[in-house]
Amino acid sequence: MTKWFHSGRRRDLCALLYDHGELRAQSLKSRLESHYDERIDPGSFYGTLSALVESGYLDRRTAGIADVYALTEAGETALLDHYAWLGDRIKRGDDSEGTGGSGDSED
């Protein structure tokens, strides 16, 4: 997994955009705050979006006075790769039949 994806907020923003196609920044922020059930600092939020754009995982365009964001092909690939990785971890846990984890001895 690439370093840009270590942040849960980055993953969650990408998941919202995967689900909705494209969203205005304020709508993204509102949906994320609703999911987290807490306010997100605007500076931190917009910094996260800028980092994702600069890394090539999001596209940003202007629509009127608002910025609109969408996943790039690289962003979608990274999100789907993470989803597959996570699914494998969960499946392993289900296959371990009550051992309380993946059954692996490594951390």
Image (tube, rainbow, N blue to C red):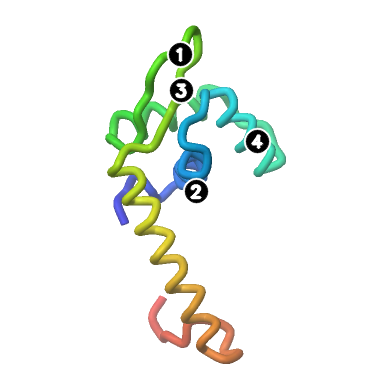
The local crowd at label 4, few if under 14, some if 14 to 19, many if 20 or more residues have their Cα within 10 Å, is some
Front in this rendered view, residue 43 or 28 = 28
Whether 100 is drawn above or below 6: the answer is below
Question: Label 4 is placed on what type of residue?
Answer: Glu
For label 3, the SS is strand
The residue lying at 51 percent from left, 87 percent from top is 95
Of labels 3 and 4, earlier in sequence is 4
Of labels 3 and 2, earlier in sequence is 2
The outermost residue toward the top is 65
Q: Quadrant of residue 63?
A: top left
Question: Label 3 is placed on what type of residue?
Answer: Val
Whether 90 is drawn above or below 67: the answer is below
For label 2, the SS is helix
Asked whether disc 1 touches disc 4, contact meaning CB atoms under 8 Å apart, the reply is no
| Residue carrying label 2 | 8
| Residue carrying label 4 | 33
The residue lying at 59 percent from left, 27 percent from top is 27
* Residue 8 on image: x %, y %: 49, 48
Of labels 1 and 4, earlier in sequence is 4
Which numbered mark, 3 or 4, is in the foreground of this view? 3
Q: Quadrant of residue 59?
A: top left
* Residue 93 on image: x %, y %: 52, 80
Measured in 3D between alpha carbons, the distance from the residue under mark 3 to the one under mark 1, in whole angstroms, is 7 Å
The outermost residue toward the front is 21
